[in-house]
Amino acid sequence: MSTISTPAAPGSFRYQLASFWSDFSASRGALVGLIFIVFILLVALFAPWVAPHDPAMQDRSALLVPPVWHAGGSWNYILGTDAVGRDILSRLIFGARYSLSISAMVVVISMGVGIFLGLLAGYFRGWIETVITRVMDVVLAFPSLLLALGLVAILSPGLTSAMIAIALVQLPYFVRLTRAAVIGEKNREYVIASRLSGAGHLRLMFNTLLPNCMAPLIVQATLSFSTAILDIAALGFLGMGVQPPTPEWGAMLANAREFMGSAYWAVTFPGLIILLTVLMINLMGDGLRDALDPKMKRS
Amino acid sequence: MFKFFLIKLAQLVPTFIGVTIVAFAFIRLLPGDPILLMAGERGISAERYAQLESQMGFDRSLVVQYLDFLKGLLHGDLGNSLVTHAPVMDEFMSRFPATLELSLFALAFAVIIGLPAGVLAAVKRGKTLDHTIMGVSLTGYSMPIFWWGLLLIMLFSSTLGWTPVSGRISYMYFIEPVTGFMTIDSLIAGDWGAFLSALHYLILPSIVLGTIPLAVIARQTRSSMLEVLGEDYVRTARAKGLSNFRVIMVHTLRNALISVVTVIGLQVGLLLAGAILTETIFSWPGIGKWMIDAISRRDYPSVQGGLVLIAFIVMIVNLLVDLAYGVINPRIRH
């Protein structure tokens, strides 16, 4: 354990990776989370081959069929069908594509823009920092879902606008984290050495500072990813996200709502898959934090 | 302390101006012409259009319009709803108590369960109980609350018939609004039946809205308890021979509470965001449902006014949390 910070292999990427992996895999929860995420990613990727049915196909002879373990259920529709006879399992499998890819885009956008703004704020300080932090304060003053809803109303409901809205709402966390990390690192000796040897602003910001600020950002990225899945589903549920008949998890819930009394499966499974996915990502995030952040280690 | 308060208040001014600019820009960025939207499908004559345009001030420069908006805001005038034609301020104020009541009950639920759970987990660190509590709270933290609400309705309302599905009080009661809090108003009216009915209607929505704050509070309590348990003064207290209970409750919990209180205060933004979903599910007549309706009906003055007021509330609460932190933490008393 104590060998982790010995200067034996500084800069050796494989050494760092091995040390990271030994910390990460020490947590059973994190491993379970990782395995689940990989599984659901594969399912989403190979959805057309994995799903038993076409997610849009309506079987008029099989409306609201219960899951297979009920009387009247059939192996043809393992998790039952919805009100217009579409296979719920297939819709969930295709829904994973939307939830995961939109959320991944959200993280990429808000992390990319957030890191850039945070680097600017922390590196240059002065009025640039004031402007950036004030604008982020304004974003934070609104409840996130409300701001996202308002933005979607401006941009007109749909997949792209939901993505942009949620990315904007997530932005302040990345900006704040990057800025704080940059300020902490900026006057360390390796940065000064790099500056004295003639590195320019861009090189200092992106090559010298950024790699040393990544640990908290990676943890935040997993958190953002799970929040994005929840927010996308919430927007879909409120009818402001991905529009029907797209098999998005939140929109599926909204559609099934009126059959709550008669067909519990149509409500239960979409929510359950949202909960499981978010829970597993959060489990993985906890493991990542323990492995990447020495201050939080073994608390 | 007062100086500290003034400095904090002054720091809010630029943020608040930013909020008003966002809300002001909002109505101008929306697709479509607000006057045509107001006119609806009947259409509008050119003269009437010009008349409305000058009446609403859309023919003047943006800067003048913005300053007018600010002036109205300072006088508590946020314009009129396009749907009901009532002042937005009145519409907001008549619904706000419903949301506040729900949020307070949700927060109470979260604190009453989350705090002891967090303490218990910290004391039993590494044991099965700790793992169970942390597992459950991570699940609560990951919960899509709109689904959670539907599940609870299916179980407790549809199947068991224990709780009502929607609204604030049984239709058998009519309570004259005084404070807008159904529970308080029914007590003022001296009607016990109504009071119990109001509580009955509050149970499920409070649980749904309180779930995520509960999880956050339990996690935060556990981690700050663990931090404090490692402090020298806790070791000293133990060395003095104090009972384990006294060490935990007095020496540890009191100090751990400092960061927990901050986290509880920061739940307000989360509660207001959660209220949008919770109120939609339970048809709770609060500002969350009102905002959703306003957005879907394209009632832009209501959306704009609601955004400003909600952001204002969040900022004020965060300021109060900052102050409370200064008061209860003797180390950073200014």
Image (cartoon, coloured by chain):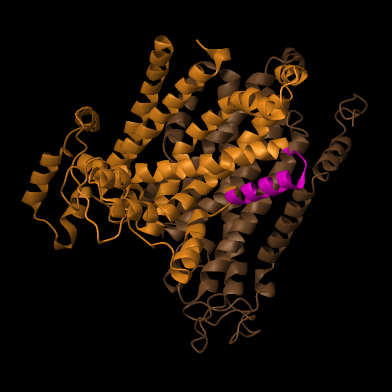
Q: Residue at x 45, y 38 (%)?
A: B269
Viewer-proximal residue, B223 or A183?
B223
Q: Residue furthest left?
A: B47
Q: Where in the figure is residue A182, as x and y percent of width and height? A: 64, 23
Image: B74 above or below A268? above
What is chain B's hue in the picture? orange
Image: A265 above or below A237? below
Q: Residue at x 29, y 53 (%)?
A: B194
Q: Is residue B55 left or right of residue A201?
A: left
Q: Is residue B129 magenta?
A: yes
Q: Residue furthest right?
A: A8
Residue A216 sits in which quadrant? Answer: top right
Viewer-proximal residue, B292 or A117?
B292
Query: Is most of the magenta stretch helix, strand or loop?
Result: helix
Over which residues does the magenta segment extend?
B124-140
Across the whole image, how many numbered discs are drawn on residues? 0
Q: Is residue A42 magenta?
A: no
Q: Which chain is brown?
A: A
Viewer-proximal residue, B316 or B126?
B126
Q: Where in the figure is residue A129, as x and y percent of width and height? A: 52, 21
Q: Residue at x 78, y 34 (%)?
A: A298
